Amino acid sequence: MYTKAQEIIDNEKYAVISIAGMRGTGKSYLGAHLDFKQKVDLALYIDVVGAFKKERQDLDFLDIDYIPKEKQIKYILNKAFQSETKELILDISLLSREEMVEFIDILSNCLIQLDKKISLVIDEIGEVLEQEGKYYSHGLERIIRIGRNKNILFVVMITQRLQKVNKHAIALSDFYIFFKTLHNLDRKAIKEILGYNSDEFKKLDTKLKTLNVGEYIITNGLDIFNKTKNLELEEQNKKLSKQELLISGYEKLKKLK
């Protein structure tokens, strides 16, 4: 599968990407199928609710049901570097939220120390980087802020309730990918993150409420890159000017498999 979202990975040296939208719209599907193989030594997926294991049954996975020590995590990572796929899913869905935060903090510290290129995809980021309360991984925030200087080249954060995720962490994103969003508070969070006033947000707000499953909008905070519905339209768009391309439509993920 090749998508316009994949072009971010292919064309950027490093990036923090936030993916948000309602449940069942295609967020985890997209995050699970981004291909980092040409850019990193290990693609690491943190599975909070079991979605990645469902989407990527071809990958190695490890169920984390207790808090391993740092040396144990380093052993796991070294084994993953030696694997054939160079991709690993860590399923932490069996942990409590307190344990999830503790595990992510230890893992983040290990990743910062590695002299290897890493990509990190985390589902339901709000479980460990919530807007208010005690469930906040400072180690993960550090990776988002300075990871690119420590060979953590790509960080992808996924959430179905953007308004519950810490705004300061999300604001560090280089790109935002928005799937269908109906909840008023989540759309308000998008408006605030992008820094739009009410008039500027109206057009995007309408689109957010009418996207179909598998359709999304990409923005870098300045320009909005709407996606085409299928490969045929994508070929037609190659003939359009850059400005026309920005407003030409949406992309259906399932049709690009």
Image: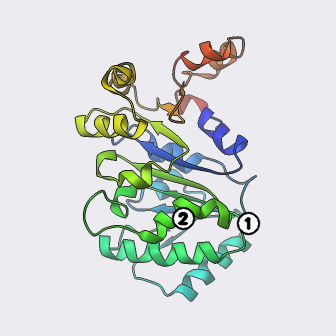
Q: x, y (%) of residue 147? A: 60, 63
Task: Name the quadrant of the C terminus.
Answer: top right
Task: Name the quadrant of the N terminus.
Answer: top right
Image vertical order of residue 103 relative to residue 46, above or below:
below
Does residue 152 appear in this view?
Answer: no
The answer to which of 34 and 19 lies nearer the viewer is: 19
The answer to which of 169 and 52 lies nearer the viewer is: 169
Disc 1 is placed on an element classified as: loop
Where does label 1 land, which residue? 84
- Res. 143 mark: 2
Disc 2 is placed on an element classified as: helix
Q: Is residue 157 left or right of residue 248?
A: left
Does residue 50 appear in this view?
Answer: yes
- Res. 59 mark: none
Q: Amino acid at mark 2?
A: Ile
Which residue occupies 52% across, 43% down?
30
